[in-house]
Amino acid sequence: MEVSLLKPTERTERIEILDYLRGFALLGIILVNILPLLSVKLPEQGTGDASYQRFLFLFVEGRFYTLFSFLFGVGFFLFISRANAKGKNGYFLFLRRVAALFILGWFHVKFHPGEALTVYAITGLLLLPFYKLKKEHNLALGLILLIALSIMASKLFMVVPLMLLGIAAGQYRLFEGVAGKVKKVVICIALLLIVSITGLIYQYQHAPSYPFGFYNGVDETTYQFLSIGIMIGPLVTALYVGVLILLLQFQIVQKLLSPLKSYGRMALTNYIFQTVFIYVAGYVFNLFESLTYLQSLFVCVTIYSIQIPFSMIWLRFFHFGPLEWIWRVVTYLEVPPLRKRVKGVH
């Protein structure tokens, strides 16, 4: 292995809106992941915990994991395209990249059985031939599969069409030149708002009248409620994405949400360390099977308050997050510069 002449991705080359979206996805993912990891207690009926549980399964569960999967597909396309444009073998590099991701996920899954990295690595490998497929074909196939699997509420297998649609989004350059597409974004948001509200009302009408557990199987009423949530998940996710993209067209919003961009630039590091922090909190404060739903929210907010400032400070001095840098080293078998050069004062 040798020191690389490969430069970090230039700021002008990054599609910064993707960093905001990755950070946004991380905010939601942990809210649901913490529940089984710490075996959060079943809420008592009529309490704030019961209301928060219903909120989670209406507005969070199946929404942010969906976004994270889609964004991995976008990243899949951009990685290979940029590598090929630099005269490298993008396909071969991508194979090493997903192999490294799978190994990391294999260790992670021992502590977090519901983790996504191994699934993304396998799916990325399966979808590699679709990189060369026409964008119209990827879009059509992705939509057909997503609709079919959503109706069947097959959350795990929905990763395939979500990543395929991510590839199609990259091919269509969906996230480039967004400022010139604001009218289209507004129209999409209006349509998605109507459909999403309709879907959420339908799901709410099927909500159990009692708090429910979901770790070890559910009853028929709860199953139907959760299945509807999975079915409408991509629509609600698309609404969230559209609204965030629209808000980011305002300079003041970009500045206010800049911490979210840093959080998303270190998405791999922060995703893994969400699990680490959850377990540390669980063992240090003996939270397993004793934490309530609202208390789990407090733990998540505490983790945000650690990870987001850390990401901002880290990226002031370094080009990549810690795990992102290691991932890059393994992918290229070269050592890119990690620390940013400090310009001397003359």
Image (cartoon, rainbow, N blue to C red):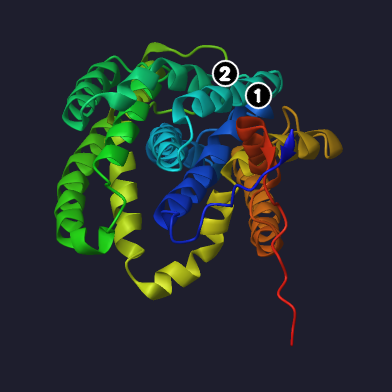
Q: 246 left or right of 283?
A: left
Q: Residues within 10 Å of mark 1 (few under 14, many from 20)?
A: some
Label ID, residue 3: none
Residue on which the image places disc 1: 112
Tell me where residue 27 appears, x and y as whole percent.
53, 47
Q: CA distance from mark 1 to mark 2?
A: 13 Å
> Residue sitting at 48 percent across and 71 percent down?
255
Which amino acid does the dot numbered 2 rest on?
Tyr
Which amino acid does the dot numbered 1 rest on?
His
> Residue sitting at 36 percent across and 16 percent down?
154
- Residue projecting furthest to the right: 284
Of 338 and 243, which appears nearest the observer?
A: 338
Of 72 and 113, which appears nearest the observer?
A: 72
Classify the position of the N terminus by image quarter. top right
The residue tagged with tag 1: helix, strand or loop? loop
Tell me where residue 322 appears, x and y as whole percent.
71, 45
Residue 228, above or below 58: above
Give the quadrant of residue 267. top right
Tell me, yes or no, if residue 115 can be seen here: no
Tell me, yes or no, if residue 179 can be seen here: yes
Residue on which the image places disc 2: 215
Tell me where residue 205 appears, x and y as whole percent.
27, 31
Q: 182 left or right of 162?
A: left
Of 223 and 19, which appears nearest the observer?
A: 19
